[in-house]
């Protein structure tokens, strides 16, 4: 096998992997958007079907990201939870209204639209990985198509050069007069 044949067969093997990687990357990229929509729908459902309660901000933590530690009473038990504060950060001792899921007392939504827990963090990381994966796969396909196009152009150029040389050689032969040979034929 020549090098070109080996590279072509290698591409045939890799091409389905690139296509699959592109599809998987796009699905991974879609996941955070789907999670965001699901969280919005769950927030609306909790506001309608949840049990209203009053929570108090115990402390405002500034670790890697800002979080508020809330405490609230539900079904006769004292509960504590952590809520990320991206847009609204209340001072310690502030009261905030929440709607609690009656089936899961640790699940609630705040008055300013933040769900309890750390929802969507993992999906965000998966989405970023999907962006990188689909980007790499798309670049690999584009690079291959570019190389293939470049190879076709090079082959066309070589073919054109060969045809031009053949035409020049054929034209030179057809228009050339033959020199008489050095042999002399005897006169009879």
Image: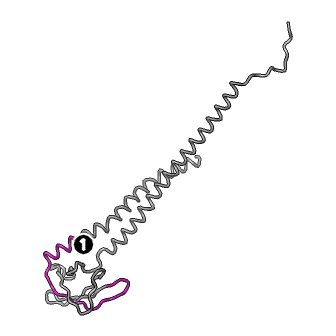
Question: Which image quadrant is residue 105 in?
Answer: bottom left
Would residue 77 be counted in the magenta stretch?
no
Q: Nearer the viewer, residue 92 or 188?
A: 92
* Residue, far top: 188
Q: Which residues are magenta?
A: 38-66
Q: Nearer the viewer, residue 166 or 75?
A: 166
Vertical placement of 157 versus 95: above or below?
A: above
Place of residue 53 in the rendered image (x, y in percent of width and height, measured from the top left):
15, 85
Vertical placement of 8 versus 107: above or below?
A: above
Place of residue 162 in the rendered image (x, y in percent of width and height, measured from the top left):
63, 37
99 displayed left or right of 18: left
Q: Residue at x 58, y 49 (%)?
A: 3
Q: Residue at x 19, y 90 (%)?
A: 78
Q: Which residue is mark 1?
A: 39
Vertical placement of 49 versus 29: above or below?
A: below
Question: Which image quadrant is residue 106 in?
Answer: bottom left
Question: Which image quadrant is residue 26 in?
Answer: bottom left
SS of the residue at dot 1?
helix
**Mark 1 closeness class: few <14, some 14–19, many ≥20 residues within 10 Å:** some
Question: Which quadrant is the C terminus positioned in?
Answer: top right
Would residue 55 be counted in the magenta stretch?
yes
Place of residue 179 in the rendered image (x, y in percent of width and height, measured from the top left):
79, 22
120 displayed left or right of 103: right
Vertical placement of 9 versus 39: above or below?
A: above
Place of residue 1 in the rendered image (x, y in percent of width and height, measured from the top left):
58, 46
């Amino acid at each position: 096998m020549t090098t070109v044949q080996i590279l072509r067969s290698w591409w045939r093997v890799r091409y389905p992997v690139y296509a699959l990687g592109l599809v998987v990357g796009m699905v991974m990229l879609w996941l955070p958007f789907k999670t965001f929509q699901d969280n919005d729908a769950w927030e609306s459902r909790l506001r309608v079907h949840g049990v209203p309660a009053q929570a108090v901000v115990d402390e405002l933590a500034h670790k890697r990201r800002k979080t508020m530690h809330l405490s609230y009473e539900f079904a006769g038990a004292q509960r504590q939870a952590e809520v990320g504060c991206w847009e609204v950060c209340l001072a310690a001792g502030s009261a905030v209204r929440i709607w609690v899921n009656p089936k899961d007392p640790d699940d609630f939504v705040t008055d300013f639209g933040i769900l309890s827990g750390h929802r969507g963090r993992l999906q965000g990381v998966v989405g970023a990985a999907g962006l990188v994966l689909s980007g790499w796969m798309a670049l690999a396909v584009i690079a291959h198509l570019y190389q293939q196009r470049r190879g076709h152009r090079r082959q066309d150029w070589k073919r054109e050069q060969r045809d031009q040389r053949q035409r020049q050689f054929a034209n030179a032969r057809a228009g050339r007069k033959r020199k008489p040979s050095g042999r002399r034929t005897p006169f009879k």
